[in-house]
């Protein structure tokens, strides 16, 4: 499966939520994600970033906790990735496997997410501790789809919410967090 997304900074989350409500888009209750990302030694995470990245996500939604393991590999940029994920039952053992095969810790962040949908497009309103508020719109597609066509479809949705292309963010939250923390960009 291929996930194509567009991300933008949000200056006024309350105003954005009001716009969604006015368009009859129902937004979920907040979900907490604790994401630990692992990369291969020396990979910087920026740009096209064709290396595989692994994530262990602890998700808490409506008091229920789940652990999700994800592999991502960028196609044209960080917001256009092949993605595979599965729920796991033994996170400690999974982390040992990840480290044993040569991946190293890259970032650790917590976010609060609210989800909504417009047709087959998922809308995520995220608040990341230390980074602020963002909106992502994403679409799951076949692996051979035309990126530019889907990106324009996603921008049309964002622009209908009053989001400007001037607020476009091209880095993943993991890369943004490392920059915010002043870490060297490469995996350790």
Image (cartoon, rainbow, N blue to C red):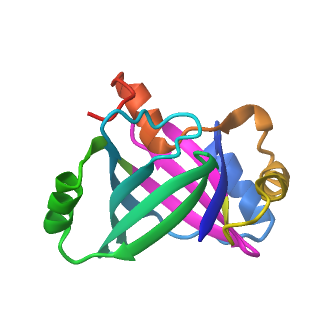
Q: In which quarter of the image is residue 61?
A: bottom left
| 43 vs 132, nearest the viewer | 43
Q: Position of residue 59 (x, y in %)?
A: 35, 66
Q: In this view, does 135 lie above or below 93?
A: above
Image quarter of the N terminus: bottom right
Q: Position of residue 131 (x, y in %)?
A: 46, 35
Is residue 123 found inside the magenta-colored segment of the image?
A: yes
Q: Position of residue 98 (x, y in %)?
A: 23, 57
All told, the count of numbered labels is 0
119 horizontally vs 140: left or right: right
Magenta: main secondary structure: strand
Judge whether residue 84 can be spotted in this image.
yes
Q: In which quarter of the image is residue 166?
A: top right
Q: What stretch is highlighted in magenta?
A: 111-137
| 22 vs 153, nearest the viewer | 153
Image quarter of the C terminus: top left
Residue drawn at 19 percent across, 62 percent down: 97
Q: Is residue 44 above or below residue 144?
A: above
179 horizontally vs 69: left or right: right
Q: Quadrant of residue 40?
A: top left
Residue drawn at 24 percent across, 49 percent down: 102
Q: Position of residue 178 (x, y in %)?
A: 38, 31
Residue drawn at 31 percent across, 74 percent down: 66
Is residue 117 found inside the magenta-colored segment of the image?
A: yes
Judge whether residue 62 can be spotted in this image.
no
Q: In this view, does 77 lie above or below 23?
A: above
């Amino acid at each position: 499966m291929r996930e194509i997304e567009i991300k933008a900074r949000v200056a006024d989350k309350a105003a954005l939520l009001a716009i969604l409500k006015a368009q009859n888009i129902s937004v979920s209750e907040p979900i907490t994600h604790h994401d630990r990302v692992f990369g291969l030694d020396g990979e910087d995470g920026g740009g096209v970033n064709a290396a595989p990245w692994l994530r262990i996500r602890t998700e808490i939604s409506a008091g229920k906790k789940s652990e999700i393991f994800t592999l991502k590999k960028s196609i044209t940029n960080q917001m256009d990735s092949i993605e595979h994920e599965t729920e796991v039952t033994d996170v400690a053992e999974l982390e040992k496997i990840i480290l044993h095969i040569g991946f190293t810790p890259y970032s650790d962040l917590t976010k609060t997410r609210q989800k909504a949908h417009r047709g087959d497009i998922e809308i995520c309103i995220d608040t990341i501790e230390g980074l602020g508020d963002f909106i992502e719109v994403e679409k799951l597609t076949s692996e051979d789809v035309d990126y530019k066509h889907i990106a324009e479809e996603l921008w049309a949705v964002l622009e209908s919410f009053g989001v400007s292309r001037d607020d476009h963010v091209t880095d993943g939250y993991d890369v943004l967090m490392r920059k915010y923390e002043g870490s060297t960009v490469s995996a350790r």
